[in-house]
Amino acid sequence: MYFTHAITRLPADTVAAGLTTASLGAPDAALTRQQFREYIDILLQLGLTVTTLPALPDFPDAHFVEDVAVMMPELAIITHPGAPSRRGEVHSMAPLVSRFRHAVWLGEGEHMDGGDVLMVDKRFFIGLSSRTNEAGISRFAREVEKFGYRVQAVPVASGLHLKSVVNYVGRNTVLLSAAAVDEPAFRDFRHIVLDPAEEYAGNTMWINDSLITPSGYPHTLRQLQQLELPIIQTDTSEIRKMDGGLTCLSLRF
Ligand code: CIR
């Protein structure tokens, strides 16, 4: 799929008050914004039109926009985020998303974070995680199967979301953690298995046949180079401190 648009949100000064399981210290708000701007520059360089929403200081995780909606050509799903502190974020995203797509809302109890949703052509692999539950996946499946998509649930053993450690990287290949290698859902793909010391680089983003990958993960970089796609590296040190990665900073469509 060729992407023409991205929606992002400026990180707030309150970023350090967001949720995290990482023990990497508090992120610096100014450096977070600098890394965010570098990310936007990359999207622009790849030909996307980028809309950036204003910061939401009362929702310190709100710049992780990927979690609140899932975009596909036929519709958008507005999620019901798994973390109670993030549920309010959907109300400031839905009006913009609705300008581009018919929006369907997940309901009470139907938990889902977009970080668990991996779309590859007409297939969705959805992580069953601490943020996404069976009810969320069933409802999502009902909405998208009408359009010919297939949905497969995948248990998330490590990491916050499925896409923390499993991503499609083009050329029929998935980049994934050693723990996900035996997952039957991914058996139709070639595998690039992450070095356990570099699991964070699993959140590499394939977009318009280029790869954006976090800088500082040399083993993964060498593995990705074998795909012979353009690769852009960018520093995400501050984003990582809050369990975030590259995919979570935008909605692409
Ligand atoms: C959270 O715990 O919800 C945020 N601090 C991080 C969300 C990252 N989202 C993503 O990878 N899709």
Image: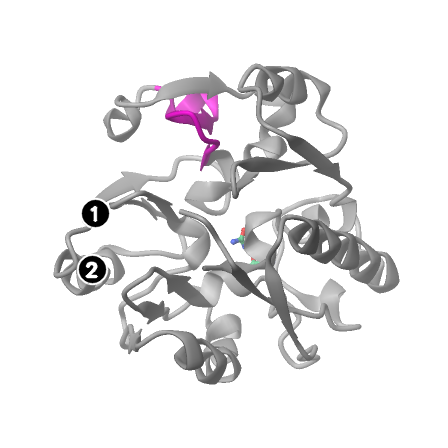
Q: Determine crowd level at label 2: few under 14, some 14-19, many 20+ residues with C-alpha closer than 10 A.
A: many
In-front residue for pair 104/130: 104
Relative side of 188 to 146, left or right? right
Q: Position of residue 21 (x, y in %)?
A: 61, 49
- If the picture is divided into quarters, which one holds ligand 1? bottom right
> Which label is found at residue 189?
none
Answer yes or no: is residue 195 visible.
Answer: no
Q: Secondary structure at mark 1?
A: strand
Question: Can residue 178 be found in the magenta stretch?
Answer: yes
**Separation of residues labelled 1 and 2 (CA atoms):** 8 Å
Mark seen at residue 151: 1
- Is the Cβ of the residue at disc 1 closer than 8 Å to that at disc 2? yes
Q: Which residue is mark 2?
A: 144
Can residue 41 be found in the magenta stretch?
Answer: no
Residue 157 spot, x, y in % from top left: 40, 35
- Whether residue 190 appears in this view of the structure is yes
Q: Earlier in the sequence, mark 1 or mark 2?
A: 2
The residue range painted magenta reads: 167-181
**Dot 1 amino acid type:** Val
Residue at point 47% right, 61% down? 67
User: From the viewer's perspective, is residue 179 above or below residue 62?
Assistant: above
* Local secondary structure at mark 2: helix
Quadrant position of residue 155: top left
Q: Quadrant of the C terminus?
A: bottom left
Tell which of 221 and 147 is nearer to you. 147
Vertical position of residue 6 compared to residue 86: above or below: above
Q: Amino acid at mark 2?
A: Val
Residue 113 in percent (x, y) is at 42, 59
